[in-house]
Image (cartoon, rainbow, N blue to C red):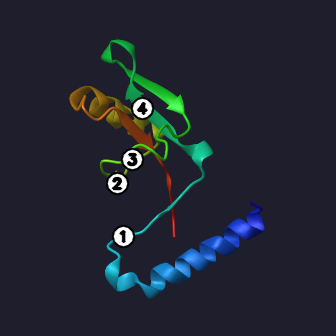
Amino acid sequence: MSEEDRAQKRVQASQWIHEHRSQIRKSYGLHLPHTVTSVHVGSGGQPLVTDGPFLEGTEVIGGIAEIEVEDLDEALHLAREWSVHAPGYNVVEIWPVMEE
């Protein structure tokens, strides 16, 4: 998709969100997948950090959490702690949100 087409889609999405604002608690645009960092349980139960999204369309997203951090390093620190302290939830994807 060209940058012009992408910008047009953002405008259309923003219009829809505005029209349904009373039903939407919060909304965020996500940056493109190449900006994603994933933390998942690697061998021996240790956190493994990879670039790019990990989840595929057949996997279930169990929930999301919005966190405010200074930078990717701080987000990775929190994600690594999550992967160790909540071993049943094997993947954390860090998606930067687009500022309105």
Query: Tag 4: residue type?
Result: Val
Q: Does 79 sit above or below residue 25? A: above
Q: Identify residue for label 4.
A: 39
Measured Cα–Cα span from mark 1 to mark 4: 25 Å
Q: Do the residues labelled 1 and 4 touch (CB within 8 Å)?
A: no
Q: Which structural element holds mark 4?
A: strand
User: How many C-alpha atoms fall within 10 Å of the one at disc 2: few (<14), some, or many (≥20)?
Assistant: few
The tag earlier along the polypeptide, 1 or 3, is: 1
Measured Cα–Cα span from mark 3 to mark 2: 10 Å
Q: Does 13 sit above or below residue 77? A: below
Q: Identify residue for label 3.
A: 69
Q: Position of residue 63 (x, y in %)?
A: 30, 51
Measured Cα–Cα span from mark 4 to mark 3: 16 Å
Q: Identify residue for label 1.
A: 26
Q: Nearer the viewer, residue 55 or 70?
A: 55
Q: Are marks 1 and 2 in contact (CB under 8 Å)?
A: yes
Q: How many labels does the image show?
A: 4
In this image, 12 relative to 18: left or right?
A: right
User: Disc number at residue 66?
Assistant: 2
Query: Tag 2: residue type?
Result: Glu
User: How many C-alpha atoms fall within 10 Å of the one at disc 3: few (<14), some, or many (≥20)?
Assistant: few
Check the picture and name the quadrant holding the N terminus: bottom right
